[in-house]
């Protein structure tokens, strides 16, 4: 894959404070082994699970995390950093370890998505880019999985690029939605970068540029006889459906079949049923009906429950920006330093101390029943979820996107129905082990006495 | 400025249908002069104006909009395009004209942000990237302006990079918020690319990595005596404030001054007032109090109305993803082809036909009273807003970011109070000229007869 990130100077895509903290650590000679842990504190509305995504992007970044000459000169121009520290940065290479949930893993609040164990400065300098990368991809994978659930087997295609937050987001939305079961994307660059199938035929502008709608339909069918999806709602959807039948008959004569029609506005329940009827009356029941236009999991559920006749769906903006929950309460926290568990006590932002592991337990039919969150090394029943992905700075395992897709599918099959609902789903049980609970209490006691003089 | 976009292959950052439509136009020999117009159809909740942004990014893209060898080979691999069309693409250069609102212009629904007049294929191929670019920057400039309004003169800094939708978004958020009055950003890459002031000091991880909070405070003050902002809420905010006083006294002895303290959780009204009291009691009233943590315009207004003592604010996620309105209902429509005005009739998605101009009218005190939207060439009272930025493929005018900042400030001063409110603001009058109204009716009549046989 193209190393897109290379070019974005990932080491500078950071909050300044990562660098000022690093400079202070450097000045203090303080660079012991630290573990940072990334997790999500709370569920957004209507959510009860997340889908881990972002690991491949992150590993690409890690491979290219360098302060080049231009970056160093810019930092020097800020007059904040010593030459010694800037020399140190120019030699920066990540030398630590990374454990992570494989992409496609279903996970829950408090559970680490990734844990980085490395010299303190290295772990600190990665904070912003770790968060930015896992945040957007996990956000969208989790949103898109809800669309797949609501679509009940119908084909979904990502149409969001025009209103994603920038091009980087557009690419990541295409990948994340493909990861959880979308068939492909309209996004050509994402198609190229990730080898994702790309789809697309025509917009309203195509039709309006011709004197008559029928001229546009015929011109397109001649250019792409094997792959024509006619957009019906430019002027009058039902009259356009009748024209589509004529195009279908023309294509039949040429030995082709009209692939589909698309509805992009109006009452999609009523229109899709009437269009289906028109197609069937003329022996064109093979023509697929595609819907698009402000669709998300909520609208899809409503359309399907109302009996809309839809075979495929273009899902755009509302999925691409995760409109009902456009961010996750994700945090990257120092949890261990030089072997000691670390805690902060900030109200509403408490985290579990120490390096951790998650064990997943399933019942006899393979359905998930509970997870156990515990300290690393404390063996619990179930399957451990965090795996080694980087050891001493070397990437040890990178599954392909195809493998990750399959992994998500297997994961999702194990998730019981009550957690899949797109409205107020049940909360999945994540048990905190007694080992973790005791450690947390002990650290809290010590910290409270040290910093506030009281318990 | 670095041509970041160069590297992202902007020509491939497109929906596939732009290319299939272009291929069909090419096959038909259909490439007359077309005008495409970008506008916003509706206001998101609590909005009554937008701030135009994205033009500089778009012009950079336009300068670098090429299908290179790698792009052509990928497109060839899709088996959708003829060799002739691919040859045509490999020679693609934008040759048309662009008229746009200068960055920083306040504008309203239905008003064009940009109009592109070019051979049909050129205008079509730009659709996705035009929308993606103007959408995110206008979205965030409009959101950030609300934060500036709510902050009532307090200093604002963009802290959003960790949860923006990707790095591209992070950079654009930093620029867009700076455009409308933020003092700077934590985003180092944006600082470098756009010459925006960068800010940042320490996170909780810095403090927790030391055995004692006071050790962390002192280490930082030693490393950055001129620029220390101590984070107070790791363990106990008020006790930390007392420690901050000690650090301030230490710095005073060394001939420096503690720059600030930061509150990131808890009851910011109560805590900020108590911290202020502690600072003042010890003669440290010069120390600025900074607030952060889930702040947006709504929370800022509430804090300030409740008497919080805050001098500066770090605004993060909720601004960076425009959380209460994470997308705009923006559309890029063909409005004229070969001199003829173009219309689509899709329900809920109607647009005004033809090339257009917006005239802004102010009262004797310079306050905006109404805009008039009309067809291009129909002179109306007021100041015309859309200006030539590209003529025959050549960029004719690019204001600097500093100039655009100033332009926004001047614009915003002219916007009467009732439109600035962050809750249910009044709707600003945009009058449709009789010339535009007549043209629209005429085109609608013709189209209705042609496509549906009825009026």
Image (spheres, coloured by chain):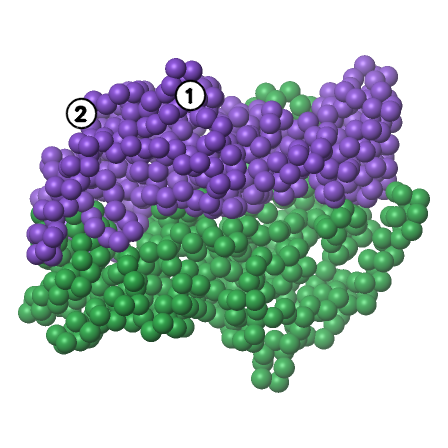
Chain colours: A purple, B green
Residue pictured at 37% horizontal, 44% vertical: A42
Q: Residue A59's spot in the image, x, y percent?
A: 33, 29
Judging from the image, what secondary structure is the residue with disc 2 in?
A: loop
A161 over A219 or under it: above or below: below
Residue carrying label 1: A367
Front residue of B326/B202: it is B326
Residue B105 quadrant? bottom right
Q: Let me know if residue B368 appears in the view.
A: yes
A383 over B316 or under it: above or below: above
Residue A209 quadrant? top right
Judging from the image, what secondary structure is the residue with disc 1 in?
A: loop
Do marks 1 and 2 both belong to one polypeptide chain? Answer: yes
Name the disc covering residue A377, or none.
Answer: 2
Real-space Cα separation, disc 1 to disc 2, in angstroms: 25 Å
Identify the subunit bearing mark 2.
Answer: A
Front residue of A328/A123: it is A328
Q: Residue B224's spot in the image, x, y percent?
A: 16, 58
Residue pictured at 21% horizontal, 50% vertical: A345
Q: Let me know if residue A1 appears in the view.
A: no
């Amino acid at each position: 894959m193209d190393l897109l990130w290379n070019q974005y100077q990932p080491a500078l895509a950071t909050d300044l404070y990562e660098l000022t903290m690093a400079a202070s650590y450097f000045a203090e000679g303080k660079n012991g082994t630290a573990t940072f842990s990334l997790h999500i504190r709370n569920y957004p509305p209507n959510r009860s699970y997340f889908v881990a995504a972002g690991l491949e992007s992150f590993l690409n970044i890690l491979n290219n995390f360098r302060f080049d000459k231009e970056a160093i000169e810019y930092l020097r121009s800020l007059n904040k950093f010593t030459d010694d520290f800037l020399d140190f940065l120019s030699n920066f290479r990540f030398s630590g370890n990374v454990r992570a949930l494989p992409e496609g893993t279903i996970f829950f609040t408090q559970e680490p998505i990734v844990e980085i164990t490395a010299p303190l400065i290295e772990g600190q300098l990665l904070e912003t880019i770790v968060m930015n990368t896992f945040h957007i991809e996990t956000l969208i994978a989790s949103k898109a999985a809800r669309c797949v659930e609501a679509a009940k087997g119908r084909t979904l295609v990502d149409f969001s690029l025009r209103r994603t937050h920038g091009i980087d987001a557009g690419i990541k939305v295409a990948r994340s939605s493909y990861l959880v079961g979308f068939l492909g994307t309209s996004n050509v660059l994402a198609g190229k970068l990730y080898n994702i199938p790309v789809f697309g035929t025509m917009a309203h502008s195509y039709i309006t540029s011709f004197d008559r709608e029928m001229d546009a339909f015929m011109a397109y069918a001649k250019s792409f006889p094997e792959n024509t999806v006619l957009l019906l709602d430019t002027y009058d959807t039902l009259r356009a459906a009748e024209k589509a039948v004529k195009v279908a008959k023309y294509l039949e004569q040429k030995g082709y079949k009209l692939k589909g029609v698309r509805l992009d506005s109006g009452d999609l329940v009523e229109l899709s049923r009437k269009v289906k009827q028109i197609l069937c009356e003329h022996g064109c029941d093979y023509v697929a009906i595609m819907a698009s236009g402000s669709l998300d999991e909520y609208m899809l559920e409503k359309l399907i429950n109302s009996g809309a006749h839809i075979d495929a769906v273009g899902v755009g903006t509302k999925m691409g920006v995760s409109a009902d929950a456009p961010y996750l309460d994700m945090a990257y926290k120092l949890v261990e330093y030089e072997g000691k568990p670390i805690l902060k006590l900030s109200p509403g932002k408490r985290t579990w101390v120490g390096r951790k592991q998650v064990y997943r337990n399933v019942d006899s039919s393979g359905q998930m029943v509970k997870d156990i969150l515990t300290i690393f090394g404390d063996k619990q029943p179930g399957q451990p979820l965090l795996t080694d992905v980087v050891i001493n700075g070397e990437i040890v395992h990178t599954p392909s996107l195809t493998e990750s897709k399959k992994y998500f599918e297997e994961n999702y099959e194990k998730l019981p129905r009550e957690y899949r609902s797109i409205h107020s789903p049940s909360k999945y049980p994540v048990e905190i082990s007694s080992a973790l609970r005791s450690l947390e209490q002990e650290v809290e006691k010590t910290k409270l006495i040290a910093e506030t003089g009281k318990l």
